[in-house]
Image (cartoon, rainbow, N blue to C red):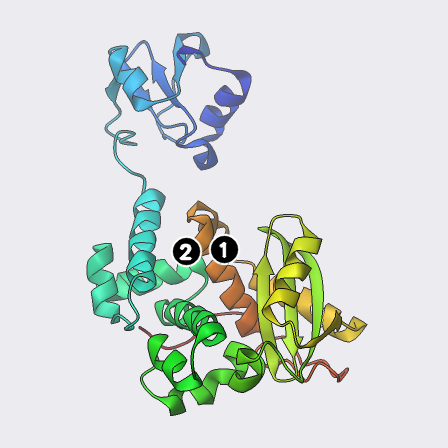
Amino acid sequence: MTGVISDEGWRAVTRRDRRADGTFFYADQTTDVYNRPSCVIRPAQRDQVLSFATIAEAESAGFRPCRRCRPDQPTLHERHTAAVVRACRVIDGTQDAPSLDDLADAAGFSRFHFHRVFKAMTGLTPHSYITACRSQRMRAQLSGADNVTDAIYDAGFNSNGRFYATSPEILGMTPTSFRSGGDGTRIHYHVTQCSMGTVLVAAADRGVCAVLLGGDDTAALLFRLRSRFPNAQVSAAHRALALRVDEALSCAEPPLAARALPRDVRAAVLCQRVREALRDLPATGGSRLVVMRPVTGDAGSA
């Protein structure tokens, strides 16, 4: 809607607040130019400023885009967000791990620049995100596969040995136990809050076996856990494990830039960062705490 700029809008303009970019545009009637709130060129008088919700409204009113802030072009943050989303969709849509060069081409960036942008946006390297997607496919495949070997190859692992080397951090238990719904396994869970709402983190004897997100419904998360592992002994985490999970979550929260990403991508990022933070988790029956290490993502590249 067109109108005189509000007090809040004017404060954003005078502060050159980048957080307001995209929420509205303002136009100076003395110059016939419209701008982003963060533009370095500020109008001299507030009573000559109009506010517009969209670029189309500003241009329909006869204003032209500023040559400094280029409000009719995507911002750098928007371009980075779009590039990361394109790369994530490529990863999500294939079982074979794409190369870093392939992902960079899909994003429209150089290899080095893409790797840096992806890490800054998500807190993960492209390799770590590929690992997250392949591991999630493995957990889904294993639940309904005729045998473990079929699930391994269907999930995109190139060999049994490569999977079994990382299976504790992917499953938190043996593949046989996971496939049988946690038969003979003890699972301790902790429910807490994160940037995406309520989160349930569950650990079995070999590590994390589930990271579940689900709004604010704790009962629904617990139902999902018990449905996934109907044959396991499920109970609330002891105090030491709960503190360990809380510490991990505080380190695993994705960068603020990740909030611009689609919810499913943010969920995958958060879950993978939690798993990486808890990679050295001891057996659930113990009380020993491992020194927390910051989540930096895998040092490798896609």
Answer yes or no: do the residues labelled 2 and 1 have beta carbons within 8 Å?
yes
Residue 189 appears left or right of 262: right
Disc 1 residue type?
Answer: Pro
Mark 2: secondary structure: helix
What residue is pinned by disc 2?
121
Residue 276 x, y percent position in the rendering: 53, 73
Question: Could you give the CA–CA distance between mark 2 and mark 1, rounded to whole angstroms?
Answer: 7 Å
Determine if residue 245 is in view.
yes
Q: Quadrant of residue 161?
A: bottom left
Q: Measured along the vertical axis of the image, is residue 61 above or below residue 254?
A: above
**Crowd band around label 2 with a 10 angstrom C-alpha radius: few (<14), some (14–19), many (20+):** many
Mark 1: secondary structure: loop
Q: Going by the picture, which residue comes out furthest to the front?
A: 146
Disc 2 residue type?
Answer: Met
Q: Measured along the vertical axis of the image, is residue 73 above or below residue 130?
A: above
Determine if residue 294 is in view.
no
Q: Quadrant of residue 137?
A: bottom left
**Mark 2 or 1 closer to N-term?**
2
The quadrant in which the N terminus is found is top left
Which residue is painted at 37% across and 82% down in the image?
A: 150
Which residue is painted at 29% across and 52% down in the image?
A: 83
Residue 247 appears left or right of 158: right
Tally of numbered discs: 2
Which is nearer the eye, 184 or 88? Answer: 184
What residue is pinned by disc 1?
255
Residue 174 x, y percent position in the rendering: 55, 86
Residue 269 x, y percent position in the rendering: 47, 61
**Crowd band around label 1 with a 10 angstrom C-alpha radius: few (<14), some (14–19), many (20+):** some
Which is nearer the eye, 266 or 205? Answer: 205
